Image (cartoon, rainbow, N blue to C red):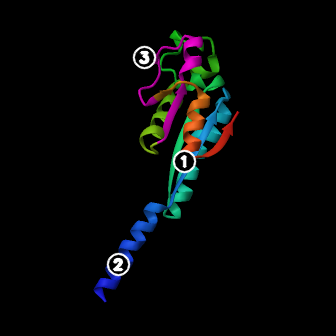
């Protein structure tokens, strides 16, 4: 009887580990409201949903377009230095994004090609952000790793 209970418990653990969902968000928007709703609130909600089903949700976010501005440490040394709405929300957003990377283990990938065009230095990007040669390569790689694709434009 004990052996059956042990086998049942082990199979439950193995099944839970197999229950991994994966999603890559194609983050292009510069709208603070959309970013908060779809990324900051949305990812937390989706993670909680799957955890409630004893499943894991792996999340990656590919950053390009107007979304660079959310991941710049020092706005004064960036193309976004005159964005007053962003400046007002910057400290709060930076804390919430860091929590996404740390607490929710979100992988952030930034398009390096346009970073150069916009003259955004890697040293002015949060440390938890990884670089990908361009957004298309980042999205191709994640989709080939079986991540579901969700646009946030």
Is 14 rendered above or below residue 65? below
Mark 3 falls on what kind of element?
helix
Magenta stretch, residue numbers: 106-129
The residues bearing labels 1 and 2 have C-alpha atoms spaced at a distance of: 33 Å
Asked whether 22 or 79 is in front, the reply is 22
- Closer mark to the observer between disc 1 and disc 2: 2
Is 9 rendered above or below residue 133? below
Image quarter hosting the C terminus: top right
Give the quadrant of residue 135.
top right
Q: Position of residue 109 (x, y in %)?
A: 52, 31
Q: Residue 99 vs residue 68: left or right? A: left
Q: Which residue is mark 1?
A: 44
- Is any part of residue 65 visible from this angle? yes
Give the quadrant of residue 50.
bottom right
Is 54 rendered above or below residue 122? below
Q: Which mark, by number, is residue 132?
A: none
Image quarter hosting the N terminus: bottom left
Q: Which residue is mark 2?
A: 7
Furthest residue toward right: 153
Asked whether 117 or 29 is in front, the reply is 117
Sequence-wise first label, 1 or 2: 2
- Residue at coordinates 48% horizontally, 64% vertically from top-left? 54
The residues bearing labels 3 and 1 have C-alpha atoms spaced at a distance of: 28 Å
Q: Residues within 10 Å of mark 1 (few under 14, many from 20)?
A: some
Q: Residues within 10 Å of mark 2 (few under 14, many from 20)?
A: few
Q: Position of residue 46 (x, y in %)?
A: 58, 52
Specify whether residue 148 is painted magenta: no
Q: Which residue is mark 3?
A: 123
């Amino acid at each position: 009887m004990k052996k059956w209970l042990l086998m049942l418990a082990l199979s439950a653990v193995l099944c839970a580990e197999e229950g991994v969902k994966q999603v890559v968000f194609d983050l292009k928007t510069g709208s603070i409201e959309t970013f908060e709703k779809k990324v900051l609130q949305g990812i937390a909600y989706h993670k909680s949903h799957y955890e409630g089903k004893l499943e894991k949700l792996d999340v990656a976010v590919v950053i390009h377009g107007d979304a660079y501005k959310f991941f710049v440490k020092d706005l004064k040394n960036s193309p976004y230095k005159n964005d007053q709405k962003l400046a007002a929300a910057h400290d709060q957003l930076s804390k919430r994004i860091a929590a996404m990377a740390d607490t929710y283990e979100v992988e952030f990938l930034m398009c390096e090609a346009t970073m150069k065009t916009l003259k955004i230095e890697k040293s002015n990007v949060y440390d938890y952000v990884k670089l990908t040669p361009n957004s298309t390569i980042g999205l191709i790689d994640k989709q080939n790793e079986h991540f579901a694709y969700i646009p946030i434009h």
